[in-house]
Every structure is written in C-alpha cells, then in structure tokens.
Amino acid sequence: MARDHYLETLRRYEGRLMELGQERADALRIAQDMHRELEAFEDKQQALDGVLKELDAAKEEAGYWSIFNITRLIERMFSLLRGGSEG
C-alpha cells in the first residue's frame, strides 16, 4: 500500500517535471521569437535613419537629380515602412 502510494507520487512528480520542461521550452521559444523581432525592428529603424540622413543631404542639392534622389529616397522609406527590406 505505501509502496503504491510512493510510486504514484513519483509518477505525479515525473509528469509535473515533464510539464515544467515543456513550459520552459515554450517560454524559450517565445523569447527567441521576440528577440528576432526586436533585431528586425532595430535593423529597420537603422535603415530608416539612413534614408532620412540621405534625404536631408538630397534636400540641400538643387536641380533634377535632387528631385530624382528625393523621390527615390521617399520610395525606399515607404517600402521599409510597409515591411520591405533595405536595398
């Protein structure tokens, strides 16, 4: 009787340990996903910062090429904001 109770207690502990292991694995996977998303956000932010700097420089210029460059930079910015990559 005591032996059966002991074995049942061990089985419950084993089951709970397995559940905890799965929960930990799930939490780690979520943390990794969040880290990847944060890195992607930072990359996009850096790309947007670069486009804004180029836009500021292009505004100082005059003439057709200035207008062309500003238009191109605005298109790149919209692409980044829509989720595209820099390039």
Image (cartoon, helix red, strand yellow):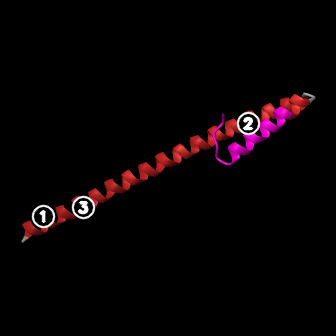
Amino acid type, mark 1:
Leu
Quadrant of the image for the N terminus? bottom left
- Residue at the disc numbered 1: 7
Q: Position of residue 60 (x, y in %)?
A: 90, 29
Question: x, y percentage for residue 53?
Answer: 79, 32
The amino acid on which the numbered mark 2 sits, given as a three-letter code, is Asp
Give amino acid for label 3: Gly
Real-space CA distance between mark 1 and mark 2, rounded to the nearest whole angstrom: 63 Å
Query: Where is residue 56 shown, x and y percent of the image?
Result: 84, 33
Position of 85 relative to 5 (above/below): above
Q: Nearer the viewer, mark 1 or mark 3?
A: 3
Disc 2: which residue:
49
Characterize the magenta stretch by its predominant secondary structure: helix
Which of 66/51 is in front?
A: 66
Q: Are marks 1 and 2 in contact (CB under 8 Å)?
A: no
* Label 3 – label 2 distance at C-alpha: 51 Å
Residue 64's x, y, as percent? 90, 30
**What secondary structure is found at the residue carrying circle 3?**
helix
The image quadrant of residue 51 is top right
- Indicate the secondary structure of the residue bearing disc 2: helix
Circle nearer the N terminus (1, 3): 1
Q: In the picture, which quadrant includes the C terminus?
A: top right
